[in-house]
Structures are given as structure tokens and as C-alpha cells.
Image: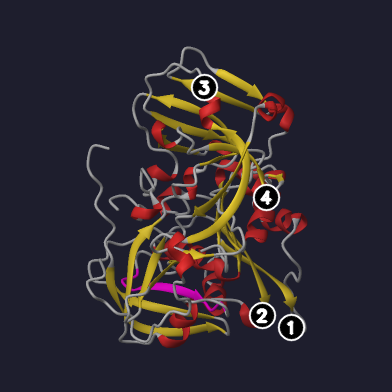
Amino acid sequence: MSGGFISRGFRGRRRRAEGDVRIPPGQYLVEGFPVLSAGPTPRTPLAEWSFTIEGEVDGPRTWSWEEFRASPSEEVTRDIHCVTKWSKLGTTWEGVSVDLLLDGVDTAAEYVVAFCDGGYTSNLPLEDVTGGKAWVAHTYEGEPLSPEHGGPARLLVPHLYFWKSAKWIRGLRLMAEDEPGFWESLGYHNQGDPWREQRYWGD
Amino acid sequence: MADAPRKLAWRIGEVVETSPETPRTKSLFLEIPGWDGHRAGQHVDVRLTAEDGYQAQRSYSIASAPENGRVELLIERLDDGEVSPYLTEELRAGDGLELRGPIGGWFAWDAREGGPLLLVAGGSGIAPLMAIIRHRQAAGNEVPVRLLFSSRSYEEVIFREELESLAAGDETLEISHTLTRSAPPGWQGYDRRIDEEMLGEVAFSPDERPLAFVCGPTPLVEAVATTLVGLGHEPARVKTERFGPTGG
């Protein structure tokens, strides 16, 4: 840790108010919604969009955009935390619960990989996307999710750093073994729990 | 994973020099005991600790080449910021600065990876691209590079003199500037926001399969990356990094 190091002359402009107990260690509050992505924003026409559950399943399940949007959605309000240090409180989303998408799927898998347009992937333990913890979100603050924020649909796993909430998601691959995704292969933590400040390998 | 990865340790670097670059930016030169080096394009996390234990963290790109023993961080002062005013106004030579890194394996380039390289920067987004340019120079690499650099005004062109000097001695390094708010009399460069026409004139053709690195404020990065794909460049060869008050 810091070993008692003090930054000479630093006082810190923003003090932690009582409400700030919602901000994990090393994070700061933002009011805007920063955009972070590794490459160009993909723009897949909705007519060509589909969502697939595949991998360690009896047979893949696929939804067209119309079928996906006809699935029951939930509205959730959550705090989100990006590994680049910003946190945003009380964001409201609508999306289809991953529990619903996996309903009736018979699998021995313990992990999933979210795969996306543009080739992005992120890996998660199955238990982190089930039990009311994750959604495939299509609406943000009452509006269709914009492309730069991951639209038409992104994974929403708000209890983990936000890179796990994969933008431009096209499906979940159920896996018997864990397999690092894009950022997880490039030095970022495999689990990514903001409350344990799991930013990078070895944290 | 087979081996438990080593934790990226916090280290205390010593500020050996500070140097104003433009009215809003300053370079910090650090000597960091135990530093294992970096790849051009990577960044560090900086952590400030107040006497009462309060801490704040931010990320800053490394502007120096890996070949340079001192690590240079380019800091843009954000008027409503908490960390950048400290780094640009309070911190001075002899002070310690706690940091860890290097971080980021995607927006990075090694001379062995080849090119050609298309670099597009907005404002302080030049920092990681400067590391790439300096690394290429230090490694004696001759991969063709084109830099398109958007600044608000002539006075705010970061690393202007060094860029001019590097380009003057290197036919394979071509630099184009655009000034978006004000241009001096007789200005020969562009004087508008980066658009499709400008990228069409400056960028390598898609047939040459350049590797593109785009760094700056989100609107610039979104526009440039989208336009490059529209011009026929492969999305997988367009790497982006965002800078700015809300981007980290």
C-alpha cells in the first residue's frame, strides 16, 4: 500500500460526504457519462442483430431484435463504476434479465463469455450474471441505448467494474472453463470487483 | 491462469523536473526506483494522499519513449479538477509522486509491430502518440508515420517545437496540424475540426493498411474512428483512447 506516503501540499478538494459511501475506493464521482472503448463504434442494423446463448448448452437459443424486445424487461437503477476511476450514481436502465434469457437452459457451465460486435469479449463467472445481478440492457434513462454507450444492447453487470458490462453484446457463451476476455487478457483483473479494488492483474 | 500474476505495486517516483508545455499543460519528469519500463502508448495510475488519509487517483499517459530512463507525464490542467491543479501548480522538483504502472496493453505500439502508422490526436491526447513517435525515433525505426494533430490555437500545440524538429530531419514522419479556434496570420495548416475530407487527404489509403491510433476528447475520437471506418479502414486496425475531464 502507500506505506504512509503523503503527497506534500495535497489537501483534496472534494471531501467524502455521507452519501459518498456509495463510491468504492479510488473512485470519483462524475455527473456526465464518459465513453470508453478500444476501437470504432460498431453499427449493426437492427434487422441483422441477434442475441444467442451458445456453448455448453443442448442447443443454441437465438433471439431476433423483435423477439428480444418482446421479452419482458425490467427497470433497474444502479450505481456504476469504471476502472478508469469514475463512478456514476443512480443510473436507470431497462433490459432483459440474464436469468430470463437462461431460463430452462440445462448446463454444467460455471463461466460465461459475453461476445460482441467488433470482437470485444468479457468473461464472468455464471454466478455473477444470475440471481438478479445482470441484464441485457436496451434502454438508458428512458431512451434507446446510443451506439457509443453500447447500443443497441449491452450487458449490464453493475456490481463489477463497467468493462464487464460489455457493449454491443450479441450473446453469451457458456463455458466449462474460465477464459480471459479482451481486457482480462491485457492486464485487467479477471473478476473486477470495485469494492475490493480489483483493477489489474494481482490486485 | 497458471501463475498468479504479480500485483502492480505502488511506487514512489521522484519529480526531477517540471516543464510548462503550453498555457494549460505541463510535463512532469520522474525517476522511479524499480520501474520495469513500458510500451509506448501505456499509462500510469497516480495516487495522491492528503495528511488526513484522503486519497484521489487518476490515470495519465506516458509521453516519453521506453528508451528514456526518465518517465514523462503530460498533465493538462482542468479548472474544476481535483488532481490536475495539484500536479501542475503545487508539485515541484524534489517531491515524491506515488504511482503504479505501466497499464494498458491495447493502445500501445512496439517498433517491431510495423506500420504504416496513422496517428490522430486532439489536444493532450498527443501524450501517448508522442511516446510512439519518440520510441520510433529512438529505435531507429523507419515505418512511415503520419500525424494529424488538432489543437485549439497555435499557442496550444503541445510539443510543437520538438515535433517540428523531428519532422525536419525525417522524411518518413509527416505532420499535419489543424487549429480549431484561432489561427495566426499566414497559417498554412488546416483551421477546422477534423472531417472526412481532411482524413482523406492526410491518412494513408486503406489499401496500405495503416495501424491507426486515435486519442483525444470523446467527440473527436468518435468522429475520427467512425470516419476512418467509413473511408474503408479495417475497424480492428483502429485503436482508440479517450482523454478529457470526464474520461479519466
Instruction: Relative to B159, say whether B225 is above or below.
Output: above
Q: Quadrant of residue A184?
A: top left
> Could you give the CA–CA distance between mark 3 and mark 4, rounded to whole angstroms?
27 Å
Looking at the image, which residue sits at the far top? A58
For discs 3 and 1, the disc positioned in front in the rendered view: 3
How far across and down, in percent of the image, does residue A28 sit? Answer: 48, 66
Question: Dot 4, crowdedness within 10 Å: few (<14), some or many (≥20)?
Answer: few
> Could you give the CA–CA distance between mark 2 and mark 4, rounded to whole angstroms?
40 Å
> Could you give the CA–CA distance between mark 1 and mark 4, rounded to whole angstroms?
44 Å
Q: Mark 2 vs mark 4: same chain?
A: no
The residue singled out by tag 4 in the image is A141
Say the numbered circle drawn on residue B77: none
* Label 3: element kind: loop
For marks 3 and 4 on the same chain, the one whose residue lies earlier in the sequence: 3
Say the numbered circle drawn on residue B184: 1
Q: Mark 3 vs mark 4: same chain?
A: yes
Span colored in magenta = B68-78
- The chain letter under disc 4 is A
Closest to the observer: A141 or A75?
A75
The residue singled out by tag 3 in the image is A103
State the residue at coordinates (44%, 58%).
B141
How far across and down, in percent of the image, does residue B192 sit? Answer: 76, 68
The residue singled out by tag 2 in the image is B154
Amino acid type at image mark 2: Tyr
- The chain letter under disc 1 is B
* Label 4: element kind: loop
For discs 1 and 4, the disc positioned in front in the rendered view: 4
Pointers 1 and 4 in contact (C-beta within 8 Å): no
Pointers 1 and 2 in contact (C-beta within 8 Å): yes
Tell whether position A93 is magenta.
no
Question: Dot 2, crowdedness within 10 Å: few (<14), some or many (≥20)?
Answer: some
Amino acid type at image mark 4: Glu
